[in-house]
Every structure is written in structure tokens, then in C-alpha cells.
Amino acid sequence: MAELLVDFITSLDGYASGEGWPGFWGLEGPEYLAWLEEQPEVTYLMGANTYRLMSGFAAGQMPAGTDEFTADEEASVDELTAARKVVFSSTLTEPLTWANSTLVRGDAVETVRAMKADEDGLLSTIGSLSVARALLRAGLVDRFRVGMFPVITGATGSERIYDGYPDVALEMIDHRTFDTGIHIVEYRPRVLQHPPLLPADG
């Protein structure tokens, strides 16, 4: 049975990106980059917007305000290109041009439920906030990992990660702080039907 990881990179105030900020908010030190290289092989799950963005990078399109990728960024894009990718979309058309990408028009929740039951290894979301939210609501997420970068993007932040989420209890199972202050925290999530009840006055 496959395991499902929701994996986010955020500013401290919970934004997925910030206008004018470089990738990784410019804080990708050697320890963090080495840790990324140590991660196991995964099948990536994404929606159409993330596919368009990441496949554009793979085709050589630069992010706004960037003239060229660093060597580390190029290596990261190359690794994504080589990995298996499942893309959930009703607007994209086949064939997908990014190598090793499969288009799924059906329901993401039911597709991932079947993948978890029929496959082995690790499935991981990349970006794709609405896909991650739907999988969490359905109770399919085994691990929830957040890379919190030591920046606050109150003026420039975009894509608030947790808007629209249910209440979720998180059991911390791992954490690590890297050389530039990046903090990785990993949890087992449990979706709550209501907030925990307060003890009765005694």
C-alpha cells in the first residue's frame, strides 16, 4: 500500500509564495539542499496550475524577475522531469508535453484512493493547494510536512495555504532546523468534525 505525503513550503505566515521573492525565499543553504537530495523516489500529484508552472520551468521559462536558474534550481527541475507525475485536470489536453506525466480527468480523491490501495511507495503532492485540501478532507493523507522559511510576507505574500481547510489535529512525528533557519516539521494529520470539547467545569 502506498503512503501519501502532503508537502508544503511556506513563509512563517502561511503563504506559498511572495511577489518579488526568489525561489525558497533565497534561503536554500547547503544543509537544506543536501536534505532535499536525500529524499526518496516519489510519484508527484498535482493540479493543472502547478503543472503549467513547473512544466514551463522545465521548458526553460524563467520565473518573473529571474534571468536564469541557479545550478541547484536546474537540478531540482531535472529531478522533477525524471519523476513520475500524475496531473488532475479537466482543462489540460493530451498528450502532456512534460516527460513522465499522466493526465487524469477523473476525481482526484477516488483516483488517489485507488493508487494508495494498488501501489507501493510514496505519493506526494507538490503545490496544488486545492488537490492537497481535497485529499486531506477525504482522510487520505498519511503525513503532512511543512517547510517553514524564516520570513513574513504580510505585504507581498500570495496563495494562503490553509484557507478552506477543515480543523485538523496534528501529531508531530519529526522535525529539523537547517543552517539558514528553515524549519521542517512533519505530522500525522487527523481531520476533526468539531473542535476538541473543553472539560466540563468541575
Image (cartoon, grey):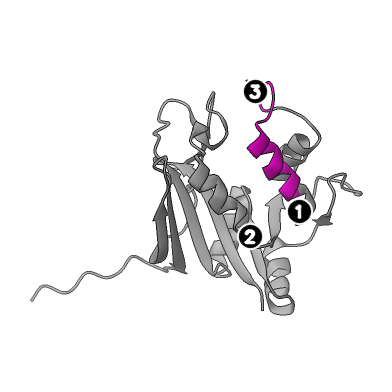
Type of residue at label 3?
Thr
Q: On the rendered structure, is 30 left or right of 178?
A: right
Instruction: Select label 2 or label 1 by which is in front.
Output: 2
Q: Nearer the viewer, mark 3 or mark 2?
A: 3
How crowded pointer 2 is (Cα within 10 Å; few <14, some 14-19, many 20+) is rated as many
Q: Secondary structure at mark 2?
A: strand
Region of the chain picked out in magenta, as a range: 63-80
Please name the amino acid that badge 1 sits on.
Val
Where is mark 1, residue-wise? Answer: 87
Q: Quadrant of residue 6?
A: bottom right
Is 106 located above or below residue 15 in the figure? below
Using the image as rendered, state which of residue 56 and residue 166 is in the foreground: 56
Q: Is residue 48 visible?
A: no
Q: Furthest residue to the left? A: 202
- Residue pictured at 47% horizontal, 53% vertical: 146
Asked whether the residues under the numbered discs 2 and 1 touch, taking CB atoms below 8 Å apart as contact, a structural biologist would say: no
Q: Which residue is mark 3?
A: 66
- What crowding class fits label 1: few (fewer than 14 Cα within 10 Å), some (14-19), or many (20 or more)? many
> Which of these two is toward me, 154 or 121?
121
Residue lying farthest right? 95
Q: Earlier in the sequence, mark 1 or mark 3?
A: 3
The reply to whether dot 1 and dot 3 touch (C-beta < 8 Å) is no
The residues tagged by marks 1 and 3 sit, at their Cα atoms, a distance apart of: 26 Å
Q: CA distance from mark 3 to mark 2?
A: 27 Å
Q: Secondary structure at mark 1?
A: strand
Q: Mark 2 highlights which residue?
A: 124
Q: Position of residue 23 (x, y in %)?
A: 57, 34
